[in-house]
Amino acid sequence: EPEVTQTPSHQVTQMGQEVILRCVPISNHLYFYWYRQILGQKVEFLVSFYNNEISEKSEIFDDQFSVERPDGSNFTLKIRSTKLEDSAMYFCASSEESAGGYGYTFGSGTRLTVV
Amino acid sequence: DQQVKQNSPSLSVQEGRISILNCDYTNSMFDYFLWYKKYPAEGPTFLISISSIKDKNEDGRFTVFLNKSAKHLSLHIVPSQPGDSAVYFCAARNFGNEKLTFGTGTRLTIIP
């Protein structure tokens, strides 16, 4: 079964450093997403991406965050200057259609720890 | 932001019995509701969804019920199996938006 692949599975970074989280969505999917889950809290939407541009973003997704689909297969989330409160599990997801009742396919996540 | 709430953080059910997971929402603009299952160290896995124009959707052992007047949905799993032990999230989508709003999850434990 096709899957969404995320690398690395765990990243530790110093506060203030830039970090790039990588995702390979399912190949025929057109819609891409990033979500995060801070330990013990709910899964939160960050951003959706379609047709090479951001289609929707949350208030969490401020100027420190950016997304890119550099080569037609990878989808990346960059945090420019990490803060302690950015420590969370980051999930990439993709879907073939605009996410109505079909749900997304999520990756296994990248655990980001900012120290 | 408590638009989607799962008031039971955990639930234990005997194998073979029915598991009922509940979810309440406050935003009347939600038009699609979804249930996801999550195992440790994995991403959420889509289980079943329901449109706001329906009140029931069934897929094998899983049935989702929607009560729009009460702003309540539930997921029924019959019969419950040990592999169903996981955290279950309900999620909702606002018409015209891409984002899903998730609840806090309910940890379901199936007792053999």
Image (cartoon, coloured by chain):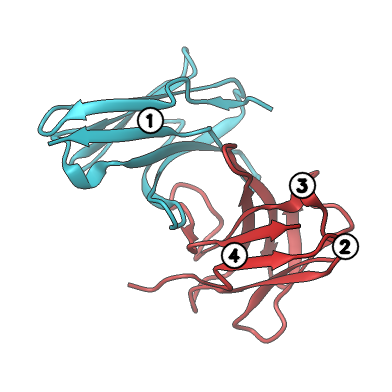
**Contact (CB < 8 A) between labels 2 and 3?**
no
Q: Which mark is residue A85?
A: 3
The lab-note entry on whether marks 4 and 1 share a chain reads no
Most extreme residue toward the front is: A115
Categorize mark 1 by other alpha carbons within 10 Å: few (<14), some (14-19), many (20+): few
Residue at 61 percent across and 64 percent down: it is A32
Which numbered mark, 1 or 3, is in the foreground of this view? 3
Q: Which residue is mark 1?
A: B54
Q: Which mark is residue A31?
A: 4
What kind of residue is marked 4? Tyr
Of residues B16 and A39, which is closer to you in this image?
A: A39
Q: Quadrant of the C terminus of chain A?
A: bottom right
Q: Which residue is mark 2?
A: A16
**Contact (CB < 8 A) between labels 3 and 4?**
no
What SS does tag 2 mark? loop
**Contact (CB < 8 A) between labels 1 and 2?**
no
Residue B52 visible within the image = yes
Of residues A29 and B38, which is closer to you in this image?
A: B38
What kind of residue is marked 1? Lys
- CA separation in Å, label 1 and label 3: 40 Å
Residue B88 image point, x, y percent = 39, 38
Categorize mark 3 by other alpha carbons within 10 Å: few (<14), some (14-19), many (20+): few
